[in-house]
Image: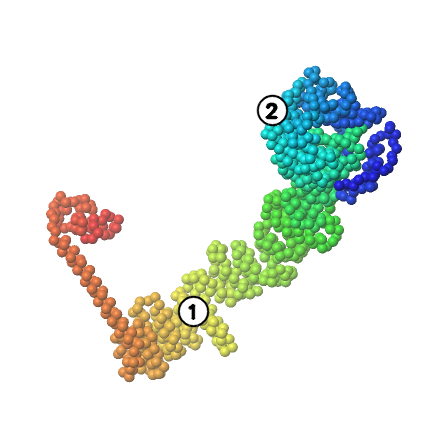
Amino acid sequence: MPPKNNAKKLHINLSSGEDEQMALLLGSLIGLVEGGPAAGMMSTKAFILVSAVERELLTGDRERISIECVECCGRNLYVGTTDGSIYHFLLEEKALPAGTATFTATKQLHRHLGFKKPVNELRAASALHRLLVLCDSSITLVNMLNLEPVPSGARIKGAVALALNENPVSRDPFCVEVCIISVKRRTIQVFLVYEDRVQIIREVSTPEQPLAVAVDGHFLCLALTTQYIILNYNTGIAQDLFPYCSEEKHPIVKRIGKQEFLLAGPGGLGMFATVAGISQRAPVHWSENVTGAAVCFPYVIALDDEFITVHSMLDQQLKQTLPFKEGHILQDFEGRVIVATSKAVYILVPLPLEKQIQDLLASHRVEEALVLAKGARRNIPKEKFQVMYRRVLQQAGFIQFAQLQFLEAKELFRSGQLDVRELISLYPFLLPTSSSFTRSHPPLHEYADLNQLTQGDQEKMAKCKRFLMSYLNEVRSTEVANGYKEDIDTALLKLYAEDDHDSLLDLLVTENSCLLTDSAAWLEKHKKYFALGLLYHYNNQDAAAVQLWVNIVNGDIHDSTRSDLYEYVIDFLTYSSDQELVWKYADWALQKSEEVGVQVFTKRPLEKEQNSFNPDDILTCLKKYPDALVKYLEHLVMDRKLQREEYHTHLAVLYLDKVLQQRPRADSMGTEVTEAQAKLRHLLQKSDVYRVRFLMEKVQGASLPMERAILHGKLEEHEKALHILVHELRDIPAAEDYCLWRSEGRDPAYRQQLFHTLLTLYLSPSSSAPELAVAAVDLLNHHAAEFDAAQVLPLLPGSWSVQLLCPFLTGAMRDSVHTRRTAQVALGLAKSENLIYKCDKMRLKGSSFRLSDKNLCQTCQNPFCEPVFVRYPNGGLVHTHCAASRHMDPSSPRPGART
């Protein structure tokens, strides 16, 4: 509650002819000095108090005459005085550049009603051109222009107070509904008022004596002696709201909208209530001794004996305080707020909401500005509101941004659909030089650039740049970026490069709209050469990209982005479809590393290689690089499995040369020699394409017995091959593996012949070594199934015991028995099938039929000319040649399944 002002202790002697404005001004100054409701509080300038009717124009020198009530209808202002007079003024409004206005009142008419009582209330019924005048407990109908009573003399008697129903129940456009507090105790009456007559339609009793009333439809909001209630006069149902004491405070009941009222509640609260008896808005806190209230959305205006206070209906905060002495009337008329003392009339002119919002933003009161802007929706046309509200959100976003409140700023920018270039333009040199962007006018903020905003604070500047990186990264793939993706991506690239951010590479390897000219210069400035190569590649300038990367690898320029850049270039060339580019850098790649460089050809996707590169051309290129040549031939032979003799032979010769070169150093490089020999042997064994005799000539005399054995095997010279393995190498397991290798995929007889050959070598009279005898026994016992026992037994020495060959003999017996029994089963099945056919033949021979020249062949439909035919089991007869042609042509008709 505002503190009491002690201005009454000061004696200000003003002559009766001095301007009342001076008294108000002095009172205002005193109020500000001694502390009013707004003392120490941040205020909003929502209204300006301007004079409408000055004292001289109204009462002149008549001190005893005071203003009792006012009414305003359009430009018409009516003033009721204590001496029973009505004054009619015409208001002229003059707009000012600041968005406010001044008023000039011209007196039109003054009429005395003939009563010595004050005019208590005035209500205009513009549809009827009538003014309802409450004076001396009677409501008189007078003409709005000449203030003459209607000729019929129609009036409502016994009225204490009245209220017009602005949401009338009656649909008759030629009448108004009036609700009065009757002089009868606890009685409310409802009338229909026409141009020249009145009609009572309802009389309602109340629980207590009503002191104030407002009406909406069938609902009456009443201030009784001890409480406020909502009363439906149609149904008689009453709803208690809350108590108050009429002896302590002046009741206020005011309709503020459809089915909603404003009431002066306890504890200095302005309470809102609907006809349902509930409150949909939070109360406003005003003075305990409020005498009047008005609504000019989004504000509630309250009047007490010292101040006019302005409260927001949106956030319930006190927004403005205007010192105002001796005020006793405050009313709103169709958005125009009028306040009066006993001698003069003033108008509270609202500042345009846009100006109020801008003032709040200028004071960095973002939340209040947003609340006010959002609440202005009902006062501004939809399209204009949307434009205004988006701009307010954007301005608020920049205020939060300047205060480093980045989360709040981002949300405001998004909600306000900010052209993100407005934000980018704060950062010097981020927008491309080709950008046509110009900042919004009027500007959304007061900063020239980021340096001014941060006042050169590097830490703040770094935070702002990190925010912009994050924000641009989020919006670049949304609708916010539509139309200017190039500006956004180019700015983002510059920020990443300047900050050495990891996301720079991610930006360049994904879809982007970075402008080449600006971006390339910026990357070069910050020595981001690898990223510059990616930019070139994205813009289809692969030659420039590879040359740049080659320069980095060669050390001509420095960029440590990738330690494996050479491997990256190789991989890039591998998947490049530009044949000329690959050939250009093939030698460079191979000179750096033959093993890695050859991957340009060996790891290339097959379909691309088929379309672009001839293997013979690649082999010609690789002649200078022996290790790479071997790798590529392995790729052709092993991976692609090309069955060309020259590739297989060439690879075998290279393997052989490497083995021969390494043989003198075998002791020191045994592992490498073994690997080379293993590759050679594997190729010789698995390939059937190379020139065997050519390789045989090269290995002769080279002390490569295993290789010679493999080549003899390829020439089907098995005895020579096995002789090398058994007698030269004495490699018994290798000899057995040879038999298995050469017989793989061949018939059992071929395999049996190989094993017999090996056994013969083991048991040869010239082979007296005891280990060969042991090898022969092991061979028989482990591979019994590969031998014909009848051929083996004559070869065995007589000194060998049965127990020594027990596994072989057991296996041989088992195989012999199995073979005999299998043959018996097959014979039995054949005999059974033969017997079935014989039975069928006997059954067919047992039946007879007659053949004549009238019988027709079922195939060709021609008669039989001789007694030679074929008869099917179903009885069908065909010529022998027709039967033969049916067997030759499966698509011909089939008289029977079997002949």
Q: Quadrant of residue 361?
A: top right
- Quarter of the image holding residue 790? bottom left
Disc 2 vs disc 1: which is toward the camera? 2
Could you tell me if residue 837 is visible in this image? yes
In the foreground, 753 or 203: 203
Give the side of residue 237 with respect to residue 248, left or right: left
The residue closer to the viewer here, 670 or 845, is 845
**Quadrant (top left/top right/bottom left/bottom right) for the N terminus:** top right
* Label annotation for residue 682: 1
Task: Report whether residue 879 is seen.
Answer: no
Mark 2 or mark 1: whose residue is earlier in sequence: 2
Residue 101 percent coordinates (x, y): 76, 31
Of 436 and 24, the residue lying toward us: 24
Q: Circle 2: is it few (<14), some (14-19), or many (20+) Cα within 10 Å? A: few
- The circle drawn on residue 171 is 2
Q: Quadrant of residue 733?
A: bottom left
Where in the figure is residue 354, as x and y percent of width and height? 71, 37
Total labels drawn = 2
Which residue is at a point 13% across and 47% down the rendered structure image? 865
857 versus 169 height, above or below: below
Q: In the figure, 662 relative to 305: above or below?
A: below
Q: Could you tell me residue 759's position as x and y percent?
A: 32, 77
Question: Under tag 2, what secondary structure?
Answer: loop
Q: Secondary structure at mark 1?
A: helix
Q: Position of residue 189 (x, y in %)?
A: 65, 25
Callout 1: 10 Å neighbours few (<14), some, many (20+)? some
- Taking the spot 40% from the left edge, 71% from the top edge, the residue there is 696
Q: Amino acid at mark 2?
A: Arg
Residue occupying the point 78% across, 25% down: 82
**Viewed as shown, does residue 786 lie left or right of 642?**
left
Three-letter amino acid code at disc 1?
His
